[in-house]
Amino acid sequence: MEISKAQRQFFTRNLMSWHHTDNDRNLPWKSEKDPYKIWLSEIILQQTRALQGLPYYQRFTESYPTIRHLAQAPDEEVFRIWQGLGYYNRCKNMLATARHIAEELKGKFPSSYDEILALKGIGPYTAAAISSFAYGLPHAVVDGNVYRVLARYFGIDTATDSTEGKKLFHQLAGDLLHNQDSAAYNQAIMDLGAMVCTPQKPDCENCPLQKHCIAYHKGIISLLPVKTKKLVVKTRYFHYLLLTNNDKLWIHKRAEQDIWENLFEPLLIETSDEVDDITATDQFKRLKLNEGLEYIGKAKQRLTHQLIHFSFYRLHYQPANHPLPKDGIWVPLKELNNYGFPKTIVSFLEKIFYF
Ligand code: SF4
């Protein structure tokens, strides 16, 4: 596809000029030069909106002002602070990377793109962001915002999730980069995508790129960017039994290889279909936990690839009639705050037990 030099120059010049005069997006990690804090913000913001990530960034930087502080923190404590952000593998990788840097690299964050890319949990986007924001290296970030701005402005209908599309957009992003100020350029294109060229109802009237924007002039904004893969969402049914005994709740740590790895949860029975009567399920019968069972409510949570339907039940535990799985612990209700739980579960527990 043919893109003229004039069209490219207009793009970079006007984007930079908008950034210096009209970009009023204010986030605490903007203009940050400490690679540790930039890395923290980027890890938190993967799959998370900036406003949602903001309090987490503040809590992490206050609790762990340096990478050594984070590396020395106990897993449970870090997972508790992370609670609610989802995608717990990010947290696990973040801890592994902090410990690797603290122990193997003497606490010094790597300063080249390739070394940064080699760290656990860091892909090309995050490596480009850290290299340019912390060290001014000429690497262009390419995320969802960037795909959208470039696809619309240049009128590109190649699918962004195809091999050809990824190559094309990365090449173009690199060509457009303002080499003298890669940090400002990267910030500008991300902010324009987040604030002006938004997925729905972009603010074209106030866009610095409007004059030469192909999607705007052809009236094809809603058709771009193009994606080939359709998201497949799996539906799951989680039935939680809040087993209490003398102001204690039975919980256990979730196993690996599933969502919410390393977080805690009450006793779970999962079914592949919706069930009218949970006590009739095989798993429930096996546990013999039906005497005095009380249904207390339901909830729903949408993850990127999963839709979880929750139902919650409460039962006062009678040791005589049902052995529990061995991996659980009884935790005093007032100490539940010390454990990390998935977002929906913690909201429910807070409501029921007021901790
Ligand atoms: S003119 Fe509209 S569609 Fe084009 S880049 Fe600007 S905001 Fe996006």
Image: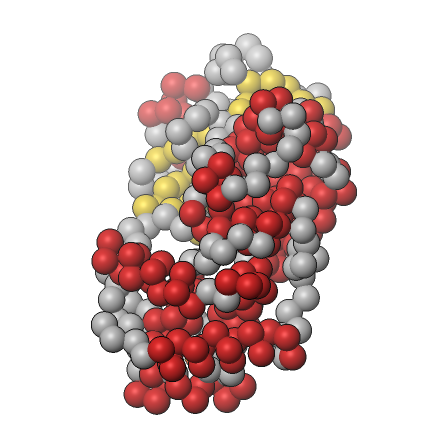
Closer to the camera in the image, 252 or 140:
140
Looking at the image, which residue sits at the far top? 320
* Vertical side of 303 occupied by 12: above or below: below
How far across and down, in percent of the image, does residue 353 sit?
69, 37
How far across and down, in percent of the image, does residue 308 sit?
42, 45
- Is 224 on the left-hand or right-hand side of 244? left
Name the residue located 70 percent from the left edge and 21 percent from the top edge. Answer: 246
How far across and down, in percent of the image, does residue 169 sit?
33, 62
Name the residue located 57 percent from the left edge and 13 percent from the top edge. Answer: 319
Query: Which quadrant of the structure image shows residue 148?
Result: bottom left
Looking at the image, which residue sits at the far front? 180
Identify the image quadrant of the N terminus: bottom left
How far across and down, in percent of the image, does residue 219 sit?
32, 87
Closer to the camera in the image, 6 or 350:
6
* Vertical side of 18 occupied by 108: above or below: above
- Is 195 on the left-hand or right-hand side of 64? left
Q: Is residue 36 visible?
A: yes
* Vertical side of 289 occupied by 66: above or below: below
